[in-house]
Image (cartoon, rainbow, N blue to C red):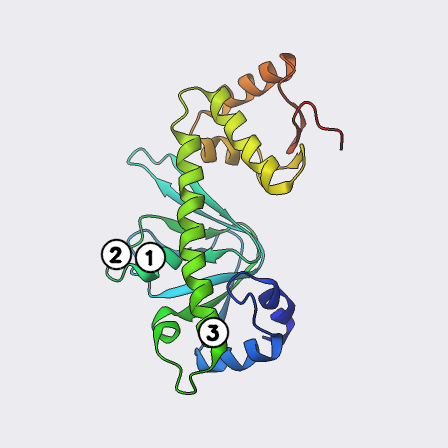
Amino acid sequence: MKRYGEILEQSDLFSGISRGDIEAMLVCLNARTREYVKDEMVLWEGDKVTDIGIVLSGHGRSLKRDVSGKTVIVTLLETGSLIGVLLAASRERRSPVSVQALDELAVLFISLEHVLQRCPNACPRHAVLLRNVLDGIAEKALVLHDRNDCLIKPTIREKVLTYLTRVAKEQNSGNLILPFDRQAMAEYLNVDRSALSRELSQMKKDGLIDFYKNSFRLPGDKD
């Protein structure tokens, strides 16, 4: 676990807690690490979730498949991302999504029950962790709100611009590196891949965007 110390120290979940304290807390919280290979499922739709997961390395995605087998990406996961924080907090609610590793993935799992239990030593670091968990729940809700804001747009062009504008704010730049290829982007936007490719080409002609593979640029950026 020590090799992930820096990642945990920089994560939102352990924000404000020193690395030494984190290592001590992981024993108290009965934390465990699991590694997954590419395409392996971390969580299946319908599973009961009682643990909070934090991505230590690699990338993943949460997804849904409709009755026709079409895949829709709900969220993308990277180092520091939380898995199941809303579900773990909702008690008996079963997962409405599956979570899949996109490459080799390492996840630290912590039982929410251990987080909510009063620390026998009444240590202030446990109170900080609980505050961070609550912040994580709020942040995850906002991420899903942003996701829905993109999905409800009526046209592919509006979906693309809404998504790219949000990523530009997150990356603080008009030069963007997207975390997926065209197929994954189509799944994330819930549109047909061919239709997306055509619309991206037209948007490029119209001067709304420029792109090469998964590198995009919004107009007016001086970077």
Q: Marks 1 and 2: CB-CB under 8 Å?
A: yes
Distance between the Cα atoms at labels 3 and 1?
19 Å
Residue type of the residue flagged with mark 1: Leu
As helix, strand or loop, the secondary structure at mark 3 comes to strand
Q: Nearer the viewer, residue 9 or 62?
A: 9
Instruction: Please indicate whether residue 157 sits to the left or right of residue 120 in the image.
Output: right
User: Which numbered disc covers residue 41?
Assistant: none
The residue to which callout 3 is attached is: 32
Q: Is residue 203 above or below residue 11?
A: above
Distance between the Cα atoms at labels 1 and 2?
6 Å
The answer to whether residue 83 shows anywhere in this view is: no
Q: Position of residue 132 (x, y in %)?
A: 47, 63
The residue to which callout 2 is attached is: 93
Q: Marks 3 and 1: CB-CB under 8 Å?
A: no
Q: Residue at x 46, y 31 (%)?
A: 189
Q: Quadrant of the N terminus?
A: bottom right
Q: Nearer the viewer, residue 42 or 140?
A: 140
Q: Position of residue 215 (x, y in %)?
A: 67, 33
As helix, strand or loop, the secondary structure at mark 2 comes to loop
The nearer-to-camera label among 3 and 2 is: 2
Q: Nearer the viewer, residue 35 or 167?
A: 167
10 Å crowding of disc 3: few (<14), some (14-19), many (20+): some
Q: Is residue 157 above or below residue 165?
A: above
Q: Position of residue 25 (x, y in %)?
A: 50, 79
